[in-house]
Amino acid sequence: MTDASADARRPQEFEKVLTGADTAVADFDTHTRSTLEKIQHFLHSNPAAVPLIVLVASVLVFGLIIGGKFFSAFSMTLILQQVAITGVIGAAQTLVILTAGIDLSVGAIMVLSSVVMGQFAFRYGLPPSIAILCGFAVGALCGWINGALVAYMKLPPFIVTLGMWQIVLASNFLYSANETIRAQDIETQAPILQFFGNNFRMGNAVFTYGVVAMVLLVAILWYVLNHTAWGRHVYAIGDDPDAAELSGVRVTRMLLSVYVLSGLICALGGWLLIGRIGSVSPTAGQFANIESITAVVIGGISLFGGRGSILGMLFGALIVGVFSLGLRLIGTDPQWTYLLIGVLIISAVAIDQWIRKVAG
């Protein structure tokens, strides 16, 4: 018997070779991060951190300047009341922007939905609850048209929603004949339209049901976006629609659902708008488009899609509310509010670009 045959029949114990071998995990990142890079990575993984820091700093600064009056329960809840509509419309805008789109028609859809609710209840004599459902149907229809043009026709969201904004705005004035339904008439004949304007007290704090609706909406959407497949698909589409398609995501259907949901949320904003101003006016909410985009941008949600938190949008809306109330209490010219908010918008986009370098 040869030595080769003996070696072939001898049991081979490969494990003995590993004795004394290096057990360290391979590490290809030999670069030690600086403090600035660590901050950059933290902000990249926590997109709502920047607006939260700015919000807390703003509250502290105005509190030090104005004093205890600013920290009163009434002042804090007044800020919430003022940003309730912006928060709701900002939620609709957030869903679209997360898919790397933008919706310039959210404010017009909101107003048209409120007008339909009022006109259906007073002009056609429908029960107010049915009129409200009709308003939601109109909002969903407008969202469906936007979504179909973007998802199936592959048209740019900016162009589609810019055109829809003009169409809906004109339809709003043509349909309503520029007629305002008075608050007194609504209060006596259809009080449910003013439901979200009703308030309740908790100590010295005064909350409206519109504030409750905004908080619940943001909480529900936060859960959906972070803990459901639908939410993960929204982020995936915004990050890379082609890669999402290859991964099995039905991009066209998802985009359509996002725009329809956005339209429904705008209709909810229309209902809140009636409660906020008390009447149904076709000229109300003229700056809702800009305010929603402002809240989204200041809230750290990337305009390039795929990154951000809806909580950041809420913090962004609150930042605008804090600046508006704080500067008003100080007694400054209202133009300073727009100036500082403009600075915040540019700063937010610059910070977003800086943070995105981590992903690059």
Image (cartoon, rainbow, N blue to C red):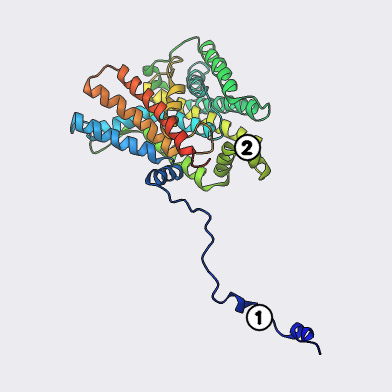
Q: Quadrant of residue 175?
A: top right
> Mark 2 or 1, which is nearer the eye?
1
User: Relative to 273, is 163 on the left or the right?
Assistant: right
Residue drawn at x 40%, y 38% is: 215
**Looking at numbered disc 2 in the image, what kind of residue is underneath it?**
Pro
What amino acid does circle 1 point to? Glu
Quarter of the image where the N terminus is located: bottom right
Which mark sits nearer the N-terminus, 2 or 1?
1
Is residue 124 visible from the viewing direction of this image?
A: yes
Image location (x, y in percent) of residue 219: 43, 41
In the image, residue 318 sits, relative to residue 332, either above or below, namely below
Q: Which residue is mark 2?
A: 241
**Picture coordinates of residue 199 (x, y %)?**
32, 32
In front of the other: 269 or 358: 358
Reading the image, the residue beneath label 1 is 13
- Find the residue positioned furthest to the bottom: 1
What is the distance, in whole Å, between disc 2 and disc 1 at their CAs?
A: 50 Å
Query: Which residue occupies 22% across, 33% down?
Result: 63
Task: Tell which of 294 and 141 is nearer to you.
Answer: 294
- Quick check: can you spot residue 205? no
Give the numbered dot on residue 261: none
Q: Position of residue 157 (x, y in %)?
A: 59, 25
- Residues packed near mark 2 inside 10 Å, few (<14), some (14 to 19) or many (20 plus): many
Q: Nearer the viewer, residue 29 or 195?
A: 29
Task: Determine whether, in the image, residue 241 is placed left or right of residue 294.
Answer: right
Badge 1 marks a residue whose secondary structure is: loop
Query: Is 7 displayed left or right of 348 in the figure?
Result: right
